[in-house]
Image (spheres, grey):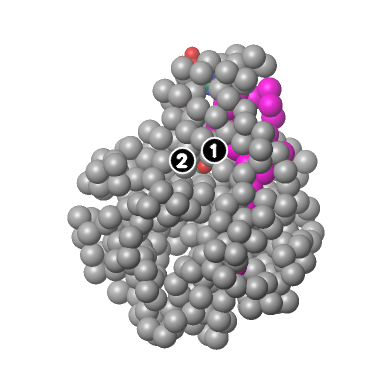
Amino acid sequence: MTTITRGGIVTGWGISVPDKVVTNEDLSVTMDTTDAWIRERTGIRERRIGGTTSQLAIEAGVAALEKAGRRPDEIDGVVLATTTPDQIIPGTSATVQDGIGVPSGAFDVNAACSGFVYALTVAHGLLAIGAERLLVIGSETLSRITDWDDRSVAVLVGDGAGAVVLEAVDGPGQLLSWKLGADGSLRHLLKCDHGGFLYMDGREIFRKAVRVVVESAEQAIAEAGLTVDDIDLMVPHQANLRIISAACQRLGIPEDKAVVVIDRYGNTSSASIPLALVDALETGRLEEGHHVLLTGFGGGMTWASAVLRWGG
Ligand code: UT7
């Protein structure tokens, strides 16, 4: 079991998504695809497209601060998960730090679609060594690295951001366990070269994703001293509804415990878990004492699972 003497609790949350809605029907006008194929093979109905990674991150961050009742000058650091930075240098977190007016350190975490769980875990490490309050954000504009003539990728992606304010508490806080994994020998399965477009071997990622999600989730649940029946809510990376269903089935978690927002947002990489988490919070699905499993996977390959006990 993870021993945490100074933990963290989420005290605020927020999201930002572009106004522009692109439906499957819209895509079927410009490429050889159909609404039926996209819905049946992925669960996606529409996605939001537009903005920049920093702009969406700033909006989500400001909303999270407002919800927490905190001013920017009360924040000790910005941890931004993104795989679509505005520029190669500087880190997009610098633009976010400046845009929100947080007088503190700021850095990017790139673990592709696992990025938010990585960022949340790293943030807990900072709390353990003295940080009081952090802004943890996942923000992406995958549309900017997408070839809109490549139907194998274009139908999947969306843009958006989700953020949480994480505050230090004495004692363990919400994070009961975490499991971060990577296998760089699989990095060819999902990649984007400088100036290039997003490429993925969808079928192979699908197969590997289910395995690593299940394994890391089982390890995180066991390390939290829980069993799968103790999990009240699962907040998975939103890459494909069929991956979420397969993972639920193999884990033995009823599908109605999984939060699904892929129908509205598509795959937003490291923004997908916070978008889903905030959706669960805003719709009253997350209550004090609930055990929440966050689990994701993505390019690298990387994967990450964490178990939280909500509230505190
Ligand atoms: O965020 C983490 C990274 N990404 C993922 O996790 C993605 C994981 N993979 C997937 O979600 C799925 O593999 C995809 C959604 C990408 C593809 O679904 P699939 O069921 O694996 O389809 P497929 O690639 O095996 O293709 C089946 C057929 C092919 O036609 P043939 O060869 O059977 O004639 C494709 O050419 O579907 C065709 N196809 C399409 N048809 C209409 C592929 N893309 C499309 C499309 N519209 N957009």
Give left or right: position of 251 versus 122.
left
Q: Specify the quadrant that holds the C terminus.
A: bottom left
Look at 51% across and 35% down and name the residue there.
264
Q: Residues within 10 Å of mark 1 (few under 14, many from 20)?
A: many
Q: Which residue is mark 1?
A: 265
Magenta residues? 135-159
Look at 32% across and 43% down and name the residue there.
247
The percent position of residue 181, horizontal first and vertical second, equals 45, 59
Camera-side residue of 218 and 12:
12
| Callout 2 secondary element | loop
Inspect the image, locate mark 2, and give the three-letter code of the amino acid beneath it. Val
Camera-side residue of 233 and 196:
233
| Callout 1 secondary element | helix
Depicted 26 relative to depicted 106: above or below: above
Does the residue tagged 1 have its C-beta within 8 Å of any atom of ligand 1? no
Residue 184 seen: no
Q: Specify the quadrant that holds the N terminus.
A: bottom left
Res 163 → quadrant:
bottom right
Q: Which residue is mark 2?
A: 261
Give the distance between the C-alpha atoms of the residues marked 2 and 1, in whole angstroms: 6 Å
Res 73 → quadrant:
bottom right
Inspect the image, locate mark 1, and give the three-letter code of the amino acid beneath it. Tyr
